[in-house]
Image: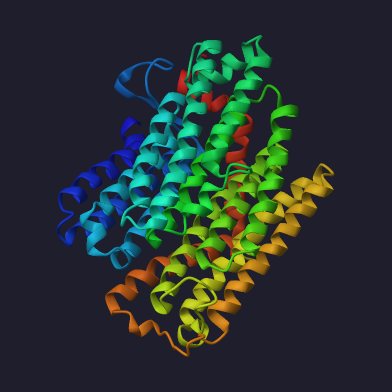
Amino acid sequence: MSWILGLPIIIPFFTAVIAFLTKERPSGAWWSVLGSLLTLIAAAALMVVVLQEGVVAAQMGDWPAPFGITLVADLLSAVMVVITGITGLAVAVYALADIDEAKERLGYHALFQVLIAGVCGAFLTGDLFNLYVWFEVMLISSFGLLVLGGSRAQIDGGIKYVALNLVSTIIFLTGVGLLYGVTGTLNMADLALAVDQSDQKGLLTVIAVMFMFAFGVKAALFPLFFWLPAAYHTPAFSVSAVFAGLLTKVGVYALIRMFTLVFDHDIGFTHTILLWVACFTMVVGVLGAAAQQDFRKILSFHIVSQIGYMILGLALYTPLAIVGAVFYLVHHIVVKANLFLVAGVAQRLCGDTDLRKIGGLYKSAPLLAVLFLIPAFSLAGFPPLSGFWAKYILVKASLDIDAWFIAFIALAVGLLTIYSMTKIWGEAFWKPHPEGVEPELRAIPRAALIAYLVPIAGLATLTIIIGFFPEPFVQFAERAAAQLLDPSDYIAAVLGGGT
């Protein structure tokens, strides 16, 4: 089990070393593609094992839990690693055309693979301190990718990104220290038992709020989100896509994991805070998007808005709501990464991402227009695409507990999302180019065009599959939600069946 759990982390690190050693050669990019493919295969193998055997865990160096380093995968962890592998492979192929030689020589591919390893490590760790370690691996590599190229906008966005994330780290470590002082352990499975047995519930609630703040920064929740739209529109489109798909989702995953497994002792207080935070995140994010005129800035604000839906599922804390959170998490990674990839091709064709300066893409590049409509309609919640089912589950979960106002907010934010996607369609695709230019896909070299369109088409196909055949994905989300709400199998896998 240690190998099957470790491979999604080991392979990207090994690939990063090779990519760094070959950064001066054209083969460096292809090593990144090969490593991403192997990571996806390893993730798929892990998923098969989890589906067959249930929760699996391994202790590094044979140190018994809770004293050693634990890697553990339940259905949520496994699917997050798989979707990380899919996104990583798509972006690695896209980067063949998107990343120029200067960025390759600066180590783009090595940094990218380190980021993928950090994301997989965060999803698979069973220990809070090691979650901090993986957060730092992600922070270092993502900052390197963010400022790669050194433009003024990149440096400005990078400083805001790092400054707030360092504040988050300080709060996180403070919470870790206090939690260890109260419980004597940092192993998540052991914490689940220790928190239930502790008589210091008030202090534990304070610590829970600290973790809520720390993970809220990582997830870009209201009011801690401003670093995201300030940073995500500045780097290469490959970087924006992997950031949009994965980085904030690690924060969401950490919130879901901790507030179902560990901090479930004061749901009336903690989850009420999460409920209001989710609503404000949805509303502020979608209003910010509606006010923007730049392709990537609109998409960046919509990341914030959509994160609110995922936290809404956690905050409602019913079985159906947790199903919706898991389903939304997987759907959004695919859709949002794909929209940033489409934005990159639009910029390559038109020379800009400012909607007032571009246009004519529907007439000159109809294939790209179709590939935009699929994830855009899905994000907005058009049936029968994946976003419709995700929103439907969350709205139904709200109505089932008579949370009518919450359901109204979710639906209203969906309507405003349609407005933003329609604005992009009308300005970038439908209206003629303001300078009379007719951008065409065939203007891009054939090899680069293939590298652009294959991952976009692949992710769009996945969106269609989830939307048109939702039943197996919903059933999977139900099983994952059941494991989250009843963590006995998780605890037994880590600590042993006799615990």
Task: Using the rendered view, name the quadrant where residue 487 is placed.
Answer: top right
Residue sitting at 55 percent across and 41 percent down? 252
Residue placed most toward the observer, 271 or 163: 163
Relative to residue 377, is residue 241 depicted above or below?
Answer: above
In this picture, residue 125 sits left or right of residue 417: left
Relative to residue 290, is residue 322 depicted above or below?
Answer: above
Q: Residue 428 appears at what percent x and percent y?
A: 53, 77
Residue sitting at 59 percent across and 65 percent down? 292
Residue placed most toward the observer, 188 or 227: 227
Q: Which residue lies furthest to the top in this view?
A: 199
Q: Residue 215 appears at what percent x and percent y?
A: 54, 35
Q: Residue 132 appears at what percent x and percent y?
A: 43, 29
What colour scheme governs how the chains and residues are painted in the rendered image of this protein?
rainbow
Relative to residue 38, is residue 8 depicted above or below?
Answer: above
In this picture, residue 280 sits left or right of residue 480: right
For the N terminus, the image quarter is top left
The answer to whether residue 382 of the structure is visible from this angle is no
In this picture, residue 357 sits left or right of residue 100: right
Residue sitting at 60 percent across and 48 percent down? 307
